Image: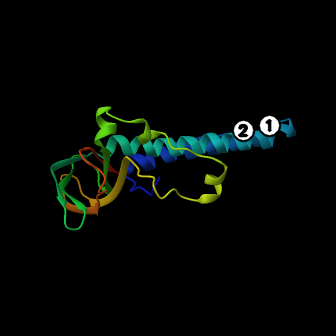
Amino acid sequence: MQMTLFNYWHYIFLSIVFLIFIGGILSALKQEKKKLIFPMIVSVTLVSALLGFFSVMVIDKYTKKVELYKLKSKRLLSTEQVVYTGTVKNVGNHKIGEVTFEIKLVNKGHATGNVKGGNFYKTSGFFAFFGGLDVMYKPQTIIKEFVVAKNLKPGAAESFRVYFDFPPYFRSVAQFTEVKGR
């Protein structure tokens, strides 16, 4: 997880988690059985860390809302690249630190179920372990992620353009896009 831009909900929930942590540490130190102090401190620390981590993820999911508009793709045959252009808009009520655009390209055989055994089955053996990467291996799914906007204010929109190399062996491609705010 990358660093996120905190809003007041983050600070409220992290303060509550910190109070739970302090309360747990104080109760562990008041324990009469000295053998239980260290395990209680470790348990309280782990629970507090997990609560803090998951609260940040949940708050990000519900307060940082971004939508994708006017998505277009164009393949540049001369350079074997594909260009995606579009606009991302912050439709939430809080500032978003980073907006990421993820594109997943799947070769036609895998998208439609029209596959041959050779696409999935790849022999491996004792010598393949020492041989390194297989030169003949051609991935059928490609996932690329780009940061397309930073510090996007509520209601603001920003246009983007991303380029990346298009595999020349892809024939008919299914594409799946997603935008996320962090």
Check contact, mark 1 vs mark 2: CB within 8 A.
yes
174 to the left or right of 120: left
Q: Can residue 70 be seen in this snapshot?
A: yes
131 to the left or right of 95: right
Q: CA distance from mark 1 to mark 2?
A: 6 Å
Residue wearing tag 1: 31
Q: Residue at x 63, y 47 (%)?
A: 125
Name the residue type under label 1.
Answer: Gln
Image coords of residue 181 (percent x, y): 32, 50
> Dot 2: few (<14), some (14–19), or many (≥20) neighbours within 10 Å?
some
Residue wearing tag 2: 27
Name the residue type under label 2.
Answer: Ser
Q: Secondary structure at mark 1?
A: loop
- Furthest-right residue in this view: 34
User: Which residue is at the front of the view, 157 or 39?
Assistant: 157
User: Which residue is at the front of the view, 51 or 32?
Assistant: 51
How many discs mark residues in the rendered view?
A: 2
User: Which residue is at the front of the view, 152 or 128?
Assistant: 128
Figure check: 158 above or below 40: below
Q: Residue at x 61, y 53 (%)?
A: 128
| Quadrant of the image occupied by residue 76 | bottom left
Image coords of residue 50 (percent x, y): 57, 42
User: Which residue is at the front of the view, 132 or 177?
Assistant: 132
Image coords of residue 21 (percent x, y): 62, 44
134 to the left or right of 78: right
